[in-house]
Amino acid sequence: MKILMFVLLGLTVGAVSSVFGTPSTQIWNPSTDIQAKGTFHLGIDNYYSVTSNDTKAYASPTYVGLTYGAFKNLEIGFDVAEPSADPLFFNLKYGIHEAEKIPALAVGGFNFGGKKDVSDMNILYAITAKTFKPVGRFSLGYYSGNGKLLLDEKGEKANTGVIVSFDRYLSEKVWFAIDYASGKSVYGSLSTGVSYSFAPNTSIIFGYVMYNNTNPIINRNNQFTTQLDINF
């Protein structure tokens, strides 16, 4: 599986701040969803702390990203994060859609930055998902990133972990998700949120991200997030 991920990444991103390039996601983690061939997805994400702001206020850059369905089952994308010293980074994902008895599967990577061991977290992942009606969809995966950047407060590697998520539509316009990434680096977190669709191609997510490690050395605090998504 890891060999397959590296082959896909090499074919697509060969030329390509602790910020995250965002593929199709739940609230925080990648999902098995794939952008349809020939279509674009514009995302504008904001994250800012809502607790302990008197001692460790924290706001991430604003992420403006574009994802494109390059081929059937393959999406590629980039994000610009500002303010940031190294604002441009890339992502891609290959996925197989869920069938009646076959779960969905996706492999990919994100946060491919341009500065070695500075912005290149290079997080690779593999995820499978299955919908159980009428309960919802469950996802399970694994990720691995740059061990020189994904560290805990002691400076030790925290660059691998599991991804677990659940999501379901509460109505035609309202969607709910909760997702988790293990690990004590800046990536590990528990997130939850809801999305409301204003139109068939436009929605907004209101979510909350609770980081596994809020040690001041990691410089992370729980954050509220708003994510505007437009398909065209």
Image: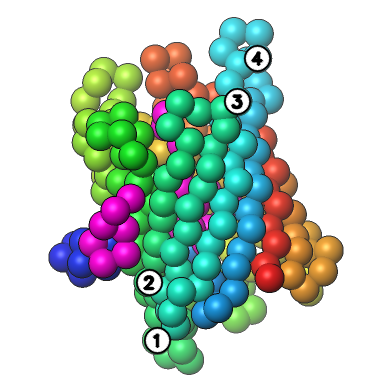
Choose mark 4 or mark 1, whichever is in front: 4
* Residue matched to label 3: 59
Q: Residue at x 16, y 65 (%)?
A: 3
Q: Residue at x 57, y 13 (%)?
A: 56
* Residue matched to label 2: 94
* Residue matched to label 1: 102
Residue 196: mark:
none
Tag 4 near tag 1, CB within 8 Å: no
Q: Main secondary structure of the magenta part?
A: loop
Tag 2 near tag 1, CB within 8 Å: no
Q: Residues within 10 Å of mark 2 (few under 14, many from 20)?
A: many
- Looking at marks 2 and 1 on the same chain, the residue that comes earlier in the sequence is marked by 2
Q: Secondary structure at mark 1?
A: loop
Q: Is residue 56 above or below residue 59?
A: above
User: Which residue is farthest left?
Assistant: 3
- Looking at marks 2 and 4 on the same chain, the residue that comes earlier in the sequence is marked by 4
Q: Is residue 151 above or below residue 31?
A: above
